[in-house]
Image (cartoon, rainbow, N blue to C red):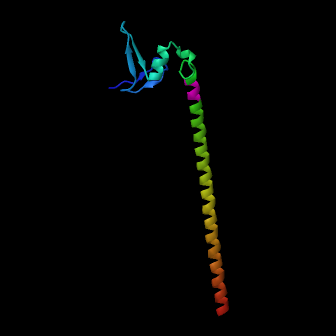
Amino acid sequence: MPQTRECDYCGSDIEPGTGVMFVRTDGTTIHYCSSKCEANDDLGREPRDVEWTEEGGGGEADRAREEAADEAEAEDEESETAEAEEAEAEESDAVEEAAEDAAEAEEAAEEMVEEDEA
């Protein structure tokens, strides 16, 4: 069964079949999700100093922003659904009232015809 690994530099998940595994001469392995992570590590940059890594705080802030956006979107969809249901209910009420008015008008017309015939 394929395993999902975590990038040793930025902390993001690495899908099976992607990324780079670097094996040092002492036998330790380092997994990179992208060449961006590999290049930054080769340049000696610490993950805590880079904003887009989890250690740099970018991961938590991004997740918080994404969650807030998802919640806002869900609330918008709920309110739109509620508004649509209200509008549909009002429309069906209006249609029913119009049908009742038409039926009353038809009955009144029939009564007038009967009165004229009598």
The reply, left or right, for residue 44 in relation to residue 88 is left
Residue at the far left in the pictured view: 1
Of the pair 73 and 59, the residue shown nearer to us: 59
Helix, strand or loop: magenta stretch: helix
Residue at the far bottom in the pictured view: 118
Q: Quadrant of the N terminus?
A: top left
84 versus 3 height, above or below: below
Magenta extent? 59-64
Q: Is residue 113 magenta?
A: no
Of the pair 117 and 87, the residue shown nearer to us: 87
Q: Position of residue 48 (x, y in %)?
A: 56, 15
The reply, left or right, for residue 44 in relation to residue 72 is left
Q: Position of residue 32 (x, y in %)?
A: 43, 20
Q: Quadrant of the C terminus?
A: bottom right
| Count of all numbered marks drawn on residues in the image | 0
Q: Residue at x 37, y 24 (%)?
A: 3
The reply, left or right, for residue 38 in relation to residue 54 is left
